[in-house]
Amino acid sequence: MTSVSTVSTAPGNTSAPGAGAGPSAPAARRAAMAAAAGTAIEYYEFGVYSYLAVVIGPHFFPSDDPTATLLATLAVFGSAFLMRPLGGIVLGRLGDRVGRKPVLILTVVGMGSATAAIGLLPTAGTIGVAAPVALLLIRLTQGFFAGGEVTGSATYLAESAPHGKRGLFGAFTPVGVALGGGTAALVAGLTTTVLSERQLDAYGWRIPFLLSLPLVALALFARKRLEDSEAFLAKKSEQATAKAPLTEVLTQHRAPLLKVTLLAIGSNCGYWVGLIFMNIYLTTELGYAKSSTFWIMGGISLFVAALMPVCGALSDRWGRKRLLTVGFAGYAVLVIPAMLVMGLGSFPLAVAAMVVLALPMPIVQSVTYPTYAEMFPTRVRYTGLSFSFNIGTIVGGGLSPYLATWLISATGNLLAPGFLLMVAVVIALLTLRTVRESSRETLA
C-alpha cells in the first residue's frame, strides 16, 4: 500500500489516474467503525448531561428559582469545554509524537469513566457544597479527555481513507456524534417514560450516566484492533514527527488555525443550539412533555446520522465548500421560521419544525471534519486540529446553551437563540470564502 502523509498545499493539485490508492477499503471501514464508536461515547456523555439538565440541576444546585438552577447546571456543562483546548494540546502532542491509536484508546476510557462517575455522585442534600464541586471536577476531567477525542478521530480517518473518499469516511466522525447524542436522547426518553417523577428524582437520573460503561467496553474493543495510520507511521519511520507540535502550529500554520476555529464556532453552534438546546427550549420554555421530546430528539439524531455518509460522499464529488455553503446558509434561513412554528402550541408541528431545522446538520457536520483535517500537515495534524477546533467549541458549544438560556431570560424573546445561531453561521460563511477547496487534493 502507498504511504500517506499530507494534503498537498498546491492549489488545484488533483490526483492523476492511478495515483496512490492509500489504505485498503477494509482497513478504512474498520477505522470508520472504531472512530464512530469512540466519538459516540463523547457525545453520549455531553448529550445525557444536556438532556437531563433540568432533572439533575436541583440535586446539585438547589434554588427557589428554576432558571437560576438551570443556568448553574449549564454553566458547569460549559466548564468542560474550557478544558478541551488543554486536553487538545496535551493529547494532540502525544498523538503527533507517540501515535494516533494509543491516544484514541486513552480518550475513550477517560471520558467513559468520568461519565459513569457522575452517576455515583452524592447530591447537595447529602454532602452540601461538595456535591457541585465534585460535579465540576468531573466535568473538567471529561472536557480534558474530550479535547483529544473527536479531533483524533477526524485525524485518524483523514489519514486512513482510500484515495478520493476522505469525505465519505471522514463523515463517520460526526456519525458517532449523532449516534451518541441520539442514544443519549433515547436513553433519557426511556428513563423518563418508564420511571415515575419520584423514581426519576430519587435514583433514575443516575442510570443514563452509568450506562456509559458498556459503551466504553464496546468502543475499546473496536479501537484495540486498529493499527496506527499509515501517514503517521511513515513520518515516524522517517523520524519526521514534530518535536514541538504546538509551537510549529502557532508559528507556521496560523491561517488554518484561525479558519478551523471560526468554522468550528458555526458548526458547533448548529449542533448545540440547533439540536441539543432545542430540547431545553421545547420542554422548559414551551412546556412540551420531557419524555416525548426526548424520543423525538433521539429519532432526529438517528435520521441525521443516516444522512451523513451520503453528504460526505457528495462532498468528494461536488466539493466541500459548495456543500458547506448550503448547510450553513440553511441554518441561517430556517432557524427563526422553525422556532416560530414550534411556538404555535402544536406538538406535531413542533416535531415537523425540528426535522426541518435539522436538515442542514448532516451537511455541516459530515463535511467540516474532513475539511478541518485537510488544512494541516501530517506531522502536526492532531495538535493543530485539536487546538483550533476546541477553541471554536468553547464558543459554539460550551457557551451557546448557556447564552441561549440567558438571552431568553434577559430579553424575554424566545427567538433570541435563533439569532445567536444566525450570527455563528454567518461567521462560518464568511470564513468559508477564504478556505481553499481540498476535496480533490491528494494526501501525497
Image: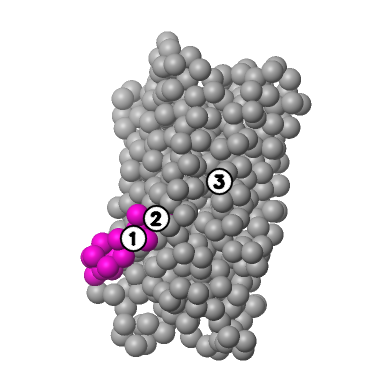
Is residue 424 found inside the magenta-colored segment of the image? no
**Label 2 element class:** helix
Q: In the rendered structure, which amino acid carries the disc numbered 2?
A: Lys
Can residue 102 be seen from the camera position used here? no
Tell me the distance, in whole angstroms, between the alpha carbons under discs 3 and 1: 21 Å
Task: Tell me what residue is drawn at x 60 percent, y 23 percent.
Answer: 283
Read off the residue under disc 3.
328
Give neighbour class at mark 1: few <14, some 14-19, many 20+ (Cα, 10 Å). some
Read off the residue under disc 1.
255
Which circle marks residue 259 in the picture? 2
Closer-to-camera residue (141/432): 432
The span shown in magenta is 244-260
**Label 1 element class:** helix
Instruction: Kindly check if marks 2 and 1 are in contact, taking CB atoms under 8 A apart as contact.
Output: yes
Q: Earlier in the sequence, mark 3 or mark 2?
A: 2
Q: Locate the N terminus by quadrant.
A: bottom right
Q: Magenta region's main secondary structure?
A: helix
Q: Earlier in the sequence, mark 3 or mark 1?
A: 1
**Label 3 element class:** helix
Query: Is 202 situated left or right of 340 in this image?
Result: left
Give neighbour class at mark 2: few <14, some 14-19, many 20+ (Cα, 10 Å). many
Is residue 248 found inside the magenta-colored segment of the image? yes
Q: Position of residue 27 (x, y in %)?
A: 60, 77
Task: Tell me what residue is drawn at x 39 percent, y 55 percent.
Answer: 259
Q: Position of residue 121 (x, y in %)?
A: 42, 35
Tell me the distance, in whole angstroms, between the alpha carbons under discs 3 and 2: 15 Å
